[in-house]
Image (cartoon, helix red, strand yellow):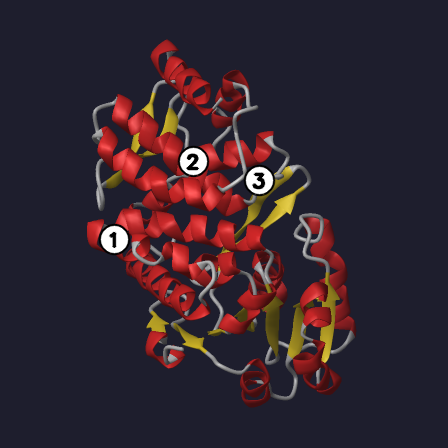
Amino acid sequence: MADTQLFDFKVKSQIQDYEVHFIDSLKESLDSSLVNGDFIIIDEKIKELYSEQLDEVLDGFRFISIEASEKQKSYEGVIPVLNQLMENGFKKNHRLIAVGGGITQDVTAFIASILYRGVTWIFYPTSLLAQGDSCIGSKTSINFREFKNQVGGFYPPKDVFIYPGFISSLPYSEIQSGMGEMLHYFIVSGKEDFDFYKSRYQQAFSDKSVLTEIIGRSLAIKKEYIEKDEFDKHIRQVFNYGHSFGHAIESLTNYQIPHGVAVSFGMDMSNFVSVKMNLIDDEVREEIREVTQYIWGDYSVSGLLPAELMKALSRDKKNVGNQLGLILNGGYGKVFKKLVDPDDTFKAWIEEYFNDQS
């Protein structure tokens, strides 16, 4: 097992700098990090799965168990959590400790950003998506009624503690999702980083130390961009590569395809369009597709209707007027945003893509 501390780093932020620590023992880290007044917000499934490591800690501190659901991550869902915190004497000088995946992160970060105009929070990410991606970058977002991720802001944790041991309890689909999400960083970064990922990705599905290497490098790539564009105004937007198509796929499959898997399909669709626009050679698309096909495994988008996908794409928040704000591939390290007309030619490309899937 690699020395996890080799991956530790600091992220510079206009709000507050924060540190990312890779840890070997969850209990030891919690024992040394928690102080009087801390209030833990924990995913109820993590509380059950890791009871041996967490029960003693939870006995000594106040905590709230939450359901990791989209309903919980909503305006209505955070109200009882806020109520419980204030009723139990949580003060501005106290800290929130989030133990869970992306939903627990969003709930905690959003509350931390608004409660008493901002309180300190610390994050123990438990999913591969959170460990390899969302734990840094400062974004907070919750749902408002049927509008997903439309309310939020930027509010980073004070510290992030990554415990690779959490990966052992994840279902295979969550490993697929995390690997799909992290892949886009390596393509955006350049050929050297893509080759790094390509030489390790199959082994990472079964070897935690290799997966930890990929997590560490994924975050290092993301750190470079967010330190230059923390509030997602310009260069950081390339990290939406695969996401316009991916979000449409998620929506049309009622989220039966995990987020990172949908993104891996989305990258392939973006690459397909990029080939049609003569931005990359087909060889580049096929080299990436070899990886994405392994990631998505038995998942399929062959049953989706091109017209429905076009309708879903038209609602993407990166669009400008009637034009689609797509992130396209001009080669490794040359991913960029381009406004594309959803004309008959583009629609024909989408139909061709889905005909090739069946």
Amino acid at circle 1: Asp
Q: Which amino acid does label 2 sit on?
A: Gly
Of residues 50 and 298, the one nearer the viewer is 298
124 to the left or right of 75: left
Name the element at disc 3: loop
Q: How far apart are marks 3 and 2 (CA)?
A: 12 Å
Nearer to me, 77 or 204: 204
Reply above or below: 96 against 253: below
The residue tagged 3 is 257
* Mark number, residue 195: 1
Considering only vertical position in the picture, is 108 above or below 307?
below
**Callout 1: 10 Å neighbours few (<14), some, many (20+)?**
few
* Residue in the image at 76% along x and 65% along y: 83
- Above or below: residue 286 compared with residue 155: above
Any part of residue 329 in sight: no
Kindly identify the residue that appears in the image at 38 percent across and 72 percent down. Answer: 17
Query: Whole-Å distance between the Cαs marked 1 and 3?
Result: 26 Å
Disc with the residue nearer the chain's start (1 vs 2): 1
Mark 2 closeness class: few <14, some 14–19, many ≥20 residues within 10 Å: many
Instruction: Determine whether label 1 and label 3 are within 8 Å by CB.
Output: no
Label ID, residue 266: 2
Residue 204 on image: x %, y %? 42, 60
Which mark is nearer the camera, 1 or 2?
Answer: 1
Q: What element carries label 2?
A: helix
Q: Residue at x 72, y 75 (%)?
A: 63
Q: Where is residue 55 in the image (x, y as percent from the top left)?
A: 72, 81
Q: Which of marks 1 and 3 is nearer the N terminus?
A: 1
Query: In the figure, residue 1 lies in which quadrant?
Result: bottom left
Q: Which of marks 1 and 3 is in front?
A: 1
